[in-house]
Image: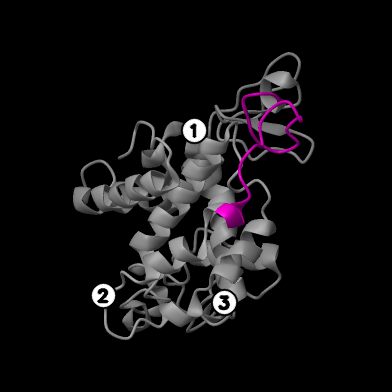
Amino acid sequence: MAKSPMSILALGLAALVLSGAGLAAAQNCGCQPNECCSKYGYCGTNSSYCGTDCASGPCTASGGGSGDPVESVVTDAFFDGIKSQATADGCPGKSFYTRQSFLDGAQANPDFGKGSTSDDGKREIAAFFAHVTQETGHMCYIEEIDGPSKPASEYCNTNYPQWPCSQGKGYYGRGPLQLTWNYNYGAAGEKLKFNGLDNPEAVAQDPALTFQAAFWFWMTNVHQVLPQGFGATTRAINGYVECDGKKPDLVNARAGYYMDYCKQFGVDPGNNLTC
């Protein structure tokens, strides 16, 4: 998952929309703890945000946040069924990635798999695993295939001085969503209490941390764009490499996995499937 500086910038500069009542904060959310994120991507505190259109945050009982328990959707059969399709030799991920580590990560992120409806929650889970499947080759790979052979400077962006690159450390893709770039490792490490800049290897060594890092990235960068369709999640993850006609084969592969998983969950995949 090579997330570009431009995509980070775009998220940070999402248009601010202020109302007289101070209800809307920023497109794609990133709300304060007392605010709800509406399915349209705005923050607020009244029923327009916390009611039936609520996607995350302190949604009201009569509003959003509904969804089946994640463990009832992601069964052993579903999780192992993805791994069973890995065709590469070796596949260290088959023993490294575990359903329990995934479920522990989901439990720590209670807004994951919860939307305005049960189907919305299942679509998010399908989207998450569609990208995991693409990024890891059906949970075969733990690290970017040629990552260790790349120069340490490959994913070191010095435009983020708050996340200085440690000498000799490679910030190439690791984990279910292939966490990449120094600024992602640094921010994930700060949130998850590990030294992401000095020890990025931990994401590929600790089965619990590997899913925690994937959920950190998902909830920070992807969860908010789900109402825009699956194609928006592809753009959030690897848009500058794949979207806008750059690599339609990869875009279509992600969409294909998503549609397959939606079918398995018995939900309509919705519109805007590609970017």
Residue 173 seen: yes
| Residue 85 percent location from the top left of the image | 31, 69
| Residue 193 percent location from the top left of the image | 71, 70
Mark 3 neighbour class, 10 Å CA radius: few under 14, some 14 to 19, many 20 or more: many
Q: Nearer the viewer, residue 160 or 205?
A: 205
Q: Nearer the viewer, residue 102 or 15?
A: 102
Q: Nearer the viewer, mark 3 or mark 2?
A: 2
Residue picked out by circle 2: 87
Residue 6 horizontal side relative to residue 137, left or right: right
Q: Quadrant of the rendered structure where residue 33 is?
A: top right
Check the image and tell me how it is coloured: one colour
Residue 59, magenta (yes or no): yes
Residue 163 seen: no
Number of callouts: 3
Mark 1 neighbour class, 10 Å CA radius: few under 14, some 14 to 19, many 20 or more: many
Q: Quadrant of the rendered structure where residue 43 is?
A: top right
Residue picked out by circle 3: 207
Residue picked out by circle 1: 227
| Residue 245 percent location from the top left of the image | 21, 43
Q: Quadrant of the rendered structure where residue 143 is?
A: bottom left
Main SS of the magenta part reads loop
